């Protein structure tokens, strides 16, 4: 059956890595409809609009979105459009797999509130951001994490700062209540987020599914990307209560290397693999991972992995390897 996929490269290296991820999808699914859209800060500089209502509607009507990255300048006049997309499409669960030889962790990050609530203001001599933890958002993210853990090794870690923040004490309280609803409650532990970041790096094999609030999840997953050799390697998926789904690399637009043909496209390619899995094609993901490994073994690694290959050189060889595998 045909599917409609929105391709949103966005800003910076998003424009360099998304085309290869889109080509990967097209190799496996030429029958799907691909709709390219423009959005982000560069689009805003050209048109005065970072995210049009039309683009948002196209996203809402699609089966899945392949997203690149966007630049959000620290300005009081320019809000993050990714936050708007997540809120408008109610993509409340951000799933970030941290996978490397011997390591298999999934970070489940609450995506709609916490410190990214968007409730903030400036006063004369201070600025305030409200950290929101609501019962409904906490229950659904904890439920999502429980169900995920049940399908895996059955262990859930809850990352909080419940000893300091009332909002996190509430998050933990709701989590325990949600866990207790199951007749056979899952094995779970709570760890303070600061110690948890260090422990995940030092003893990653102890972890299965980790659930935490929005900003803690953002920081934890960037730090945990170290276990996979860096941000250029980690994909993510965003799911909600309806059929909407958005797939994107964990990394941002990387302005420091944008335009230099140095970005590692693996996180974007793996995001395409997650998209295919979501739409029922699990076999394709295995081919994609094999083609990535074969490309490295052929000596083509990007700079972040200690190699000399450009984005284009890696991508060309990867597509050659992939085509050879699927023929
Ligand atoms: P955001 O706030 O949008 O998540 P960020 O400020 O965390 O973005 P990134 O854009 O993710 O920053 O970049 C962080 C660092 O990682 C930069 O030095 C960048 O060059 C590097 N980096 C990110 N993605 C890649 C990639 N795909 N390949 C190589 N290096 C990358």
Image (cartoon, rainbow, N blue to C red):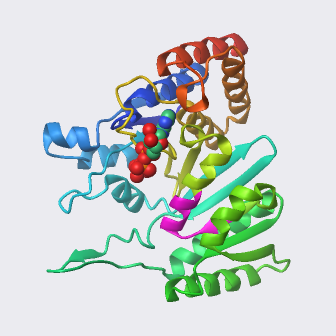
Residue 212 is inside the magenta segment: yes
State the image coordinates of residue 92 (x, y, percent, origin top left): 50, 63
In the picture, the quarter occupied by the N terminus is top right
Q: Position of residue 312 (x, y in %)?
A: 48, 17
Does any portion of residue 142 appear in the rendered image? no
Between 87 and 114, the one nearer to me in the picture: 114
Q: In the rendered view, would you say 174 is above or below 64? A: below
- Horizontal side, residue 206 vs residue 313: left or right: right
Magenta stretch, main secondary structure class: helix
Image quarter where the C terminus lies is: top right
Residue 143 appears in view: yes
In screen coordinates, is 252 left or right of 108?
A: left
Count of labels shown? 0
Identify the residue at horizontal 45%, vertical 31% (top origin): 18
Q: Residue at x 16, y 40 (%)?
A: 45
Position of residue 194 relative to residue 66, above or below, is below
Task: Determine the residue positioned at 46% across, 36% down.
Answer: 5
Specify the quarter for ligand 1: top left
Q: Is residue 245 magenta-colored?
A: no
The picture quadrant where one finds residue 286 is top right
Q: In the rendered view, would you say 91 is above or below 264?
A: below
The x, y position of residue 99, in whole percent, is 71, 45
Magenta span covers which residues?
A: 210-220
Where residue 110 appears, x then y in whole percent? 53, 66
């Amino acid at each position: 059956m045909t599917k409609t996929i929105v391709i949103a490269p966005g800003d910076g290296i998003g424009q360099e890595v998304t085309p290869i991820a889109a080509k990967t999808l097209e190799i496996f699914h030429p029958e799907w409809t691909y709709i390219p859209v423009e959005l982000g800060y560069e689009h805003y500089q050209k048109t005065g609009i970072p995210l049009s209502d039309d683009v948002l509607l196209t996203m809402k009507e699609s089966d899945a979105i392949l997203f690149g990255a966007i630049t959000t300048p620290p300005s009081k006049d320019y809000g993050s459009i990714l936050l708007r997309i997540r809120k408008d499409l109610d993509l409340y669960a951000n799933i970030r797999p941290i996978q490397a030889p011997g390591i298999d962790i999934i970070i489940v990050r609450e995506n709609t509130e916490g410190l990214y609530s968007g409730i903030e203001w400036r006063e004369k001599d201070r600025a305030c951001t409200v950290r929101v933890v609501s019962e409904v958002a906490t229950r659904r993210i904890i439920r999502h994490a429980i169900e995920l853990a049940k399908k895996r090794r059955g262990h859930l870690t809850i990352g909080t700062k419940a000893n300091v923040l009332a909002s996190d004490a509430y998050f933990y309280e709701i989590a325990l209540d949600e866990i207790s609803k199951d007749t056979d409650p899952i094995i779970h532990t709570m760890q303070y987020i600061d110690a948890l970041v260090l422990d995940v790096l030092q003893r990653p094999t102890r972890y299965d599914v980790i659930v935490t609030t929005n900003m803690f999840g953002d920081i934890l997953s960037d730090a945990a990307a170290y276990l996979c050799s860096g941000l250029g390697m980690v994909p993510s998926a965003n799911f909600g209560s309806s059929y909407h789904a958005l797939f994107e690399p964990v990394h941002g637009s990387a302005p420091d290397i944008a335009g230099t043909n140095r970005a590692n496209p693996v996180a974007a390619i793996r995001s395409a693999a997650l998209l295919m899995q979501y739409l029922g094609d699990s076999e394709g993901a295995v081919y994609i991972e094999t083609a990535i490994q074969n490309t490295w073994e052929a000596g083509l690694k990007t700079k972040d992995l200690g190699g000399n290959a450009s984005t284009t050189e890696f991508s060309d060889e990867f597509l050659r390897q992939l085509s050879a595998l699927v023929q």
